[in-house]
Image (spheres, rainbow, N blue to C red):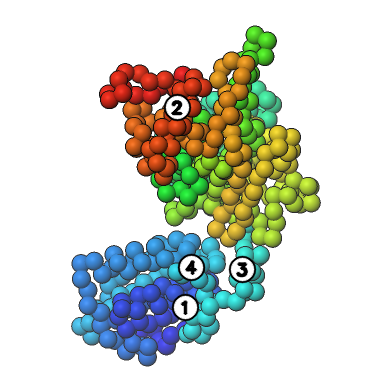
Amino acid sequence: MEGRENEQLEYKKTTAELKEGVISLASMLNKHGHGVLYFGVKNDGSIFGQQIGKDTTSSVSKEIKNYLRPIVTPIITLLEEDNKIIIKVEAYGEDKPYAAYGRYYLRSNDEDLQMTNTQLEDFFINKNVDYSKWENEITQYGEEVIDEELLISYMNKGNEIGRISFLYKDVNDALTKLGLMKNNKLNNAGIYLFSSLKPLTLKLAVYPTDERISFIDNVIFKGNIFECIDYAYKYIIKNINWRAEIIGMNRVETPEIPVEAIREIVVNSFAHMKVNNSSYNEIYITPTKIHIYNPGFLVKGKSPLDFANGNNGPIARNPLINTVLYLNKTIESFGTGFGRVFKLCDKENVNYLYKNNEFGFAFEFLRKQNVSINVPINVSINLSKTESLVLKIIKNNKGINRAQIAKIINKTEMTVQRAIKKLIDAKLIRRVGSNKTGFWEII
């Protein structure tokens, strides 16, 4: 074999030691960014041999992809030595630190040692916060995958506000000048901004309870950055509560959370995300919060408050993507987003939380426990938490019955019936058809 075990080489007698092998890969990647693992070889390098079934190599690959984070794609090869089969697994990765089964390890000679808190902290402090290398990697795709209508609309907006000085000529010319194409090939930033390949996955859901056991609505949306921003913003706006009042001859609607603040955080989640095959942006709404998550931590040891207060200059995790978003005013200006969100929320007495760790960044708008849903006349109806949930479920599930609602919100049918009576009395819903075959309708 290649010699004795070392900081980039590990032997395992059989795949019965698969978990230990995955740990060795993680520790070798953390030390050198590269590791080689053999199954069917004893610790001293002598060949033992590995039995191979139809699913053996796929099981090894699946274990690595499921339990080594951030995800890596192993190179698996079957070799024959002395009429015995061995499995060679090779992995490369620069996205340190890597975790195996939720824990972090570091290679020392031929041992896998669990990292101390200090070692792990040093990894994250020194972690490269700039994803520009990924952004500028050239892909196999050309202008044929570009959504030209989206690009033209983007260019027109940039020209109109004066941030883009050149006029649209054609796809190649525009994207080359924007830094998204080179020698007729798109880079990753160009693909994720303007392509029709639907490169991003966005998961969205509305839950009737904070436990998030069952959902009222669940969507998986795929698109480019502009499409995902637009869809995410509209999804939240559709599912928050609005207070409607008649002032004079005009109907005035006020959202429970400032829509400008919502849009700012949604845009931020895509501007500063880290793109890889194992993660996705996520939005979910419960009775008490609106949760907006993106993979890729903010900056280790920093919080949004540090940037809002001007204590730190703007840090663009995806500088090329950020610049393109700025040129058509999707991003208002660099480094000021959190400050605007905090001011808007403070003005409307909206509380918020943010969570920043090594896996991602989450921002949460906290909703008021007893929201007011108003009918379109000059009166306000205060609904309880249960009544609000029943109203939302009826709105999103035409034909749903009382028993089904009770199961979703984990309440008795009698409780649901009382909530329905309150909604009927408030003229928020009405029954269409008979009790047996009809349905409730939002007024």
* Dot placed on the residue nearer the N-terminal end, 2 or 3: 3
Q: Is residue 283 left or right of residue 43?
A: right
| Circles 2, 1 touching at the beta carbon (< 8 Å) | no
Mark 2 = which residue? 421
Closer to us: mark 2 or mark 1? 2
Q: Is residue 181 left or right of residue 355?
A: left
Quarter in which the N terminus is drawn: bottom left
Tell me the SS state at disc 2.
Answer: helix
Residue 285 seen from this side: yes
Q: Residue at x 71, y 37 (%)?
A: 349
Mark 3 = which residue? 123
Closer to us: mark 4 or mark 1? 4
Q: Give the CA separation, mark 4 to mark 3.
A: 16 Å
Binning the other alpha carbons within 10 Å of mark 3 as few (below 14), some (14 to 19) or many (20 upward) gives some
* Dot placed on the residue nearer the N-terminal end, 4 or 2: 4
Q: Position of residue 191 (x, y in %)?
A: 48, 41
From the viewer's side, name the closer residue of 124 and 284.
Answer: 284
Residue type at mark 3 is: Phe
Mark 4 = which residue? 102
Q: Give the CA separation, mark 2 to mark 3.
A: 58 Å
